[in-house]
Amino acid sequence: MDELIGKRIEVQSYKHNGLMHRIWDAVFVIDVQPSYIVVGTSKVKVIEHDCKIWYTREPAISIYFKNKWRNIVAMFKKTGLTYYVNLASPAILDNKVIKYIDYDLDIKMFPEKTIKLIDVKEYTFNRRRFSYSEDIDKILKFNINEIKELMKKGQFPFNDKQIKDYYEKFLKEMKENGNTNKNTF
């Protein structure tokens, strides 16, 4: 897995019914640990399920957990570091592609450390539409509480210093690898 560090890979998000939700093209692998993968992005192409294309606006560090029902995007906004948590299935790495199922609910922590649960209506709608099981519902609700506690305590992955260290590593590796094209910075 360490051979992925410094390489570009793809991230694919699916819905519970197996259909593609979103693709992040060419994210940059910064770190690979036994329980998670860290990637950096800046102006990365995103392809939606309806084939619409857009580019991320600000640099971000994302952490895809292999054994937790979440992934985290730490966005470096002008207003400060903002965390966006997707409640999702544990990520798998399949042929140099990170894959997970998006379960609609998201948690956002703003730079001033306020926390907000978002997309509850979307979750309620899709829970019925895709027949999420009671077990999935319980897992997601448990994770909401656990994530909020980690956020309040500033514990990994919600530790600003650790995220900024990953960002510095991302910038350094991008320069060392000669990745200074318009889709990088």
Image: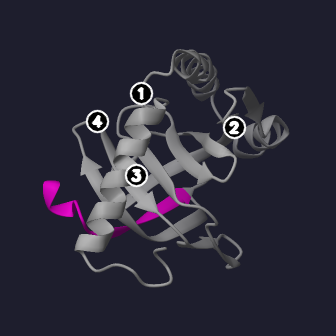
Classify mark 3: helix, strand or loop.
Answer: helix
> Which label sits on residue 156?
1
Classify mark 4: helix, strand or loop.
Answer: loop
The amino acid type found where label 4 is placed reads Ser
Residue annotated with mark 2: 105
> Which label sits on residue 35?
4
Judge depth for marks 3 and 4 and give the one in front. 3
In front of the other: 41 or 24: 41
The amino acid type found where label 1 is placed reads Phe
The amino acid type found where label 3 is placed reads Tyr
Q: Quadrant of residue 107?
A: top right
Classify mark 2: helix, strand or loop.
Answer: strand
Percent of width and height locating residue 19: 60, 62
Give the class, few, some or many, for how many residues have Cα within 10 Å of label 2's Cα (few <14, many ≥20).
many
Q: The magenta stretch spans which residues?
A: 1-13
Q: Residue 87: within the magenta? A: no
Q: Quadrant of residue 115?
A: top right
Left or right? Give the position of 40 relative to 17.
left
Residue annotated with mark 3: 167
Contact flag, marks 3 and 4 (Cβ < 8 Å): no
Percent of width and height locating residue 84: 62, 42
Percent of width and height locating residue 149: 56, 15
Measure the C-alpha gap from mark 3 to mark 1. Answer: 15 Å
